[in-house]
Amino acid sequence: MEELKKTKIKCSDPTHYRDKNCCGEEFEISEAVYIEKYWYESTSGNFYKYEDSAEIICPKCGARNRIYSREELKKLKHYFKEIKKEDA
Ligand SMILES: [Zn+2]
């Protein structure tokens, strides 16, 4: 489904949790880096790994857009330019 790569996202993070402001420009997901965030917990010798909210880096301004409220974008992650993994 090549056309899914052309899915457009607007650079806008309503939470503004980063210092950098989002530019508000639109871009295609094939241009952007998708970051999967994980956090870890170890309890009684057992080690657990959890998926946290993901982020998308805007290719135009470099701002990070959190996508925790956009489940549909998580399904499209393989159409992004690159997937990176980070600790939350
Ligand atoms: Zn931007």
Image (spheres, rainbow, N blue to C red):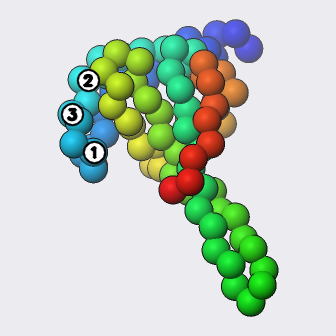
User: Dot 2, crowdedness within 10 Å: few (<14), some or many (≥20)?
Assistant: some
The percent coordinates of residue 46 (x first, y second) are: 78, 80
Image spot of residue 73 (x, y percent):
56, 35
The kind of secondary structure element at disc 1 is: loop
Identify the image quadrant of residue 36: top right
Q: Is mark 2 within 8 Å of ligand 1?
A: yes
The quarter of the rendering in which ligand 1 is drawn is top left
The disc, 2 or 1, on the residue closer to the chain's N-terminal end is: 1
User: Which residue reaches farthest bottom?
Assistant: 44
Q: Is residue 25 above or below residue 75?
A: above
**Whole-percent x and y of residue 64?**
38, 36
Dot 2 falls on a residue whose secondary structure is loop
Residue 77 in the image: above or below residue 18: above
- The residue that label 2 is drawn on is 24
Disc sitting over residue 18 in the figure: 1
Specify the farthest residue to the front.
45
* Tag 2 and tag 1, C-beta contact below 8 Å: no
Image quarter where the N terminus lies is top right
Residue at point 69%, 27% (across, down): 78
Q: CA distance from mark 3 to mark 1?
A: 7 Å
Whole-Å distance between the Cαs marked 2 and 3?
Answer: 9 Å
Q: Is residue 60 visible?
A: yes
Mark 2–mark 1 distance (CA, rounded to whole Å): 15 Å
Q: Which mark is residue 21?
A: 3
Is residue 15 rendered to the left or right of residue 6? left
Q: Eyeballing the image, is 20 above or below 80?
A: below
What residue type is disc 2 on? Gly
Give amino acid for label 1.
Answer: Arg
